[in-house]
Image: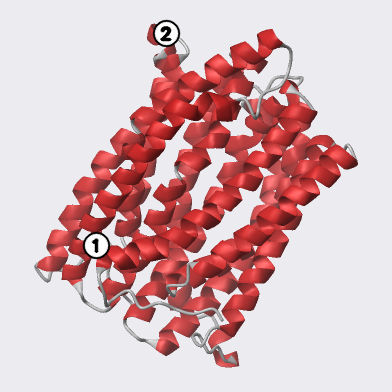
Amino acid sequence: MARVRDMTQGRPARLIISFALPLMLGNMFQQMYTMVDTMIVGKAVGVTALASLGASDWLNWLVIGLIQGLTQGFSIQISQRFGAEDWDGLNRSITGSLLLSGGIGVVLTAAALLAVEPVLLLLNTPADVLPGSLLYLRIMFSGTLVVLAYNALASVLRALGNSRTPLVAMVIASIVNIALDLLFVLGFHWGIAGAAAATVIAQVVSCLVCLWALRSLPIPRVERAHWRLSAALARRLLSLGAPLALQNTIIAVGGMVVQSVVNSFGVLFVAGYTATNKLYGLLEIAATSFGFSMATYTGQNLGAKKIDRIRSGIRSATWMAVAMALFITACMILFGKFILMLFISGDPAEQEQVLAIAYRYLFIMSTVLFVLYLLHIYRSSLQGMGDTIVPMISGFVEMLMRIGCAIFLPAFVGQDGVFLAEVVAWTGAAILLVSMFFVRLHRLEKGLPLRFGRQKG
């Protein structure tokens, strides 16, 4: 049976890692089916199809980032009400987040489908890549409501301390996705359309698993009256969710500008860049998992007014995250080429060029991976405090640094300038987030109100 977890009692390190591990495994399965899409398309359909997936990456992430930002912001209110043992406020926060998610999902689906072609043209998507990217994104965006429903339900579960159900959902969805990939792409020869359809169907399955689990929890106990969304609660939820959605939008816009620079280097460069970007999710699995863990941990302990536990928690999370990042760095440097070859097809000369581009990008990212892990830990901890403004500003920092480096550095260091844009963006954002976290924590320890974290309702 699904259960909730109180993170206001017990050893912080044990709580954080036990919450994060199921998320890591769940994210690993999620990345697995994303990677399988790419592997099957890259091997079975070819380099141009691989480039088509790559050219669609950032625009797809823009929509997903909007969804994740909103639902993660809504979950801050839920975790704080849970920590404060405000059961009526908890139930109203859960239903309010679901109602807002549904309304926003309808609008976002229509906007994404209308904007997809003009945006791809604006990004200078190569002519031979454009049809495949359009087809893939139109199918993916048709399932936007499903993606939003899964993220909303999974965010509620995580806010209640339940990280196991999202793991189960991802395991089942991964199995479904891989089976359908093999059927649709290799069996029915549907190509890129088959890969997209398999992903959408798998997301439907993960959504249903989370819905079943939420209905079986002892908390919440939602009644009809809780489904009336007050204006005050809507404002509170949107004040938490909108900045995080904007933060992810800003990051995605920066990524799309970089993608337009990447597109100018030709199909082989796009294919190599895509192969490594498909590993990007694998590289940051533990980072996002520790981040979700710290958002819930910080939110619950802030709600319970146990500020001393926030400091001990961030200390434990930092050491664990850096150790994990260094381990992954070593694995990628040693075995990265073998993994990248799983995505690459074509004649030997093409494969050699694409692999050289992909491994160079992977090596540069891997050497400073610990910075990305610090970014996630401190950004999520600030969000758990209810401060969504500084994380949003960090998104601006990422965007400006990513765009600036991608545009200007290639003139001095060649293609490496595009690769360096990513790590420079991480570094600038991480410096801001770590600094501001300790400023906020100091205010809490002194009993001073947080400028952006006052709790209402």
Front residue (pair 226, 319): 319
Circle 2 residues within 10 Å: few <14, some 14–19, many ≥20: few
Of the 4 image quadrants, the one containing the C terminus is bottom left
Check the image and report above or below for 101 versus 425.
below
Q: Which residue is mark 2?
A: 411
- Residue 263, located in which quarter of the rendered image? top right
Question: Can see residue 143?
Answer: no
Q: Which residue is mark 1?
A: 313
Looking at the image, which residue is at 39% across and 9% down? Answer: 413
- Which amino acid does the dot numbered 1 rest on? Gly
- Which amino acid does the dot numbered 2 rest on? Ala
Of the 4 image quadrants, the one containing the N terminus is bottom right
- Residue 43, located in which quarter of the rendered image? top right
Check the image and report above or below for 361 versus 197.
above
- Residue 207, located in which quarter of the rendered image? bottom right
SS for dot 1: helix
At which x and y percent is residue 416?
43, 15
